[in-house]
Amino acid sequence: MKIQLLGTGGADGIPGLYSDSRVSQHARAFGGKDIRSRSAALVDDCLKLDLGPDTWSQMATYGLDARDWTALLFTHSDADHFAPDELMYTLYPFNDFEFVGFIVYANLRICRRILEKFPEWPVEMRTTKSFESFQHGGYVITPVRAHHLDDEDAHNYLISDGRSTLLYGTDTGIWDEPTWDYLSGVKLDCLVLECSEGLASTAYDGHLDAAEFEMVLNRLRKMGTVFDTTQVWTTHHSQLGEATHAELEAHFNPMGVNIGFDGVEIQF
């Protein structure tokens, strides 16, 4: 299996659009891996994870074609992950297709919002619920509940092709016990996990800082979900986290964690 991290930034990206933080200044000056667009990913070139406001730029930058998508999976309805207006370009008058060429998998809130916005559209949508697995092509996909939004079934995604298993979590917080219980029976070949708050902890519990990331990772290792050969990568970094890419590497690399960056392809 392969996952490409198309975007690894938080809600305002790096550099932050209106930010004069040290991290934003550094990104503007040096570019490279310190430029982070809003978080999104693509599995095996066909499973698109989230449709945010940077979608067009990401697809053009990496030479990708959205006509290869067979599924679009939404994690939750925050604006950096769910930009429904981008769906309009799948049909007339922007092209000659008579139906949307991929299945949309999303929680009830997102499905309702798409139906309200495009009530007559020929789009196949399937409502997802945490801990209820479904089959898509050769993949078994399981949404697991994130500790991120009180009033919405926000998802992280387990994706397995029968040989490898991925857990993709951009907005996790510290999971509640039902999620830990579910993950105790899983062995991961790749873990992509958010570290939005970086080296600057806050009181908000819907994202992870570096210390919480390490705590989550250690618990996953202790219960056998993450093991020696599991690839571990970060994503969803905020300029408010007060850490450049190099500073994140210095902190995380000694514990066997790779720092995600826009465009990286991960094979496992």
Image (spheres, helix red, strand yellow):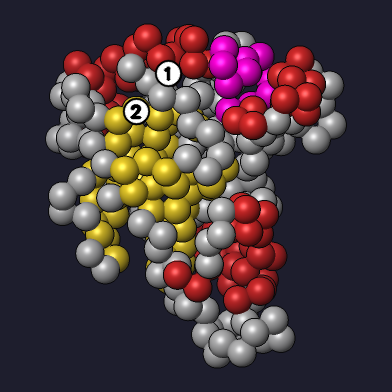
What is the distance, in whole Å, between disc 2 and disc 1 at their CAs? 11 Å
Assess whether residue 240 is covered by the magenta stretch.
yes
**In this picture, residue 161 sits left or right of residue 128:** left
Residue 99 point in image, percent of width and height: 52, 85
Q: Which residue is mark 2?
A: 232
Q: Is residue 151 visible?
A: no
Quadrant of the rendered structure where residue 247 is? top right
Residue 213: give its label. 1
Q: Residues within 10 Å of mark 1 (few under 14, many from 20)?
A: many
Secondary structure under badge 2? strand
Residue shown at the point (40%, 69%) measured from the top left: 70
- Tell me, yes or no, whether the two marked residues, 2 and 1, touch with CB atoms within 8 Å: no
Residue shown at the point (40%, 63%) measured from the top left: 46
Secondary structure under badge 1? helix
Residue shown at the point (45%, 70%) measured from the top left: 68
Q: Is residue 155 above or below residue 218?
A: below
Residue 224 point in image, percent of width and height: 16, 24
Q: Which residues are magenta?
A: 237-247
